[in-house]
Amino acid sequence: MYYNLTVTIVSVLVAFGVGGIEILTLVGGQLGLSGPFWDTLADLNFETIGVSIIALFVVAWALSVAYWKYKRFDERFVASERT
């Protein structure tokens, strides 16, 4: 349950982040905007962003498993199924 919730939240945040970057890139290109922010945005490497997103999912998975083990939910569910 925690893993599903964590992955859903991370997916939504990633989708908004990538979508926001794409929208800002399109707006900057169409309006001919320049400056440090717009130049940095235009030079973003999406391969690096993709690797970062994969790392984020791995970290989210590891944290949710660690929380699950820390709270000993696996022992609670086994005990409740026996009764």
Image (cartoon, rainbow, N blue to C red):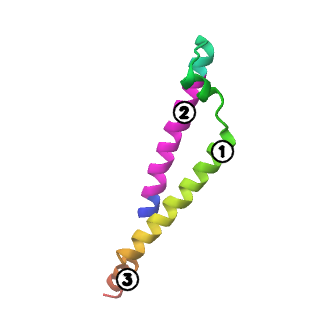
What residue is shown with label 1? 48
Q: Give the alpha-carbon distance from disc 1 to disc 3, as whole Å.
A: 39 Å
Which quadrant does the C terminus fall into?
bottom left
- What kind of residue is marked 1? Thr
Q: Main secondary structure of the magenta part?
A: helix
Q: Residue at x 50, y 66 (%)?
A: 62
- What kind of residue is marked 3? Glu
Q: Is residue 1 in view from this perspective?
A: no
Q: Reply above or below: 67 against 7.
A: below
Mark 3 surroundings: few (<14), some (14-19) or many (≥20) residues within 10 A: few
What residue is shown with label 2? 19
Residue 52 spot, x, y in % from top left: 60, 49
Quarter of the image for residue 71 reads bottom left
Please report whichever mark, 2 or 1, sits nearer to the chain's N-terminal start.
Answer: 2
What residue is shown with label 3? 75
Task: Please provide the residue range marked out in magenta.
Answer: 5-25
Please report whichever mark, 1 or 3, sits nearer to the chain's N-terminal start.
Answer: 1
